Amino acid sequence: MANAQRPVVNQRLYFVGLHIEWLAEQLANQMIAKTVLEQSLGESVLFHLIKTYQAYLAEIAAAYTVPLTDFTNAKQLLELLEVEGRQSSEALELYELEAADSWLNKLQRQYHSIGPVDRSGTGSQNSQIVAISNSDNRNTLDLESIKHYWQQLTAIIDNQRERLEEW
């Protein structure tokens, strides 16, 4: 039986690749300020990377025929697998990466650090103008960091899929 989550994961990885290509082109053109591009596209890429990761957790769950849920981390998947009397080396590997000082841990922390757009809480609900200060840019991702996260996530998904197919 085909895993219905696989196309979702593949599509999200493709979206990240599109964003990376566009970011590289825009940085080369220098028409928009680098910090603006990195903050805007960096947040978009973080969103797609995290959603890819969450969809991949669901793909693992489907491979082990456990009920699908909205996983946000590997611990949740491991807990569900335990309830179902199953074990997954793939989920355990991801859990260990989340807990260690790894690329996955950094990716998750970066994503969670974005926070609300209006950090002061004093903005007008009708305002369409956003001021960008240096303090707002502390969570931006440069092109190389974005590529690194994408390559690492793609590599672990590919590697684990090979193992799952052998199983």
Image (cartoon, helix red, strand yellow):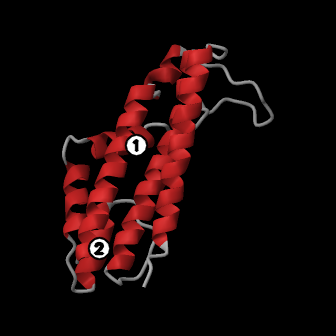
Relative to 134, does residue 153 appear above or below in the rendering? below
Task: Tell me the SS state at disc 1.
Answer: helix
Q: Which residue is mark 1?
A: 150
Relative to 142, does residue 164 appear above or below in the rendering? below
Q: Could you classify mark 1 by the number of other residues whose Cα lies within 10 Å: few (under 14), some (14-19), or many (20 or more)?
A: many
Taking the spot 31% from the left edge, 65% from the top edge, the residue there is 161
- Furthest-right residue in view? 126
Q: Could you classify mark 2 by the number of other residues whose Cα lies within 10 Å: few (under 14), some (14-19), or many (20 or more)?
A: few
Task: Tell me the SS state at disc 2.
Answer: helix
Nearer to us: label 2 or label 1 = 2
From the top left corner, tell me how far across and down residue 37 is, in percent: 58, 24
**Is residue 119 in sight in this rendering?**
no
Q: Which mark is residue 165?
A: 2
Taking the spot 45% from the left edge, 67% from the top edge, the residue there is 6
Amino acid type indicated by mark 2: Glu
Amino acid type indicated by mark 1: Trp
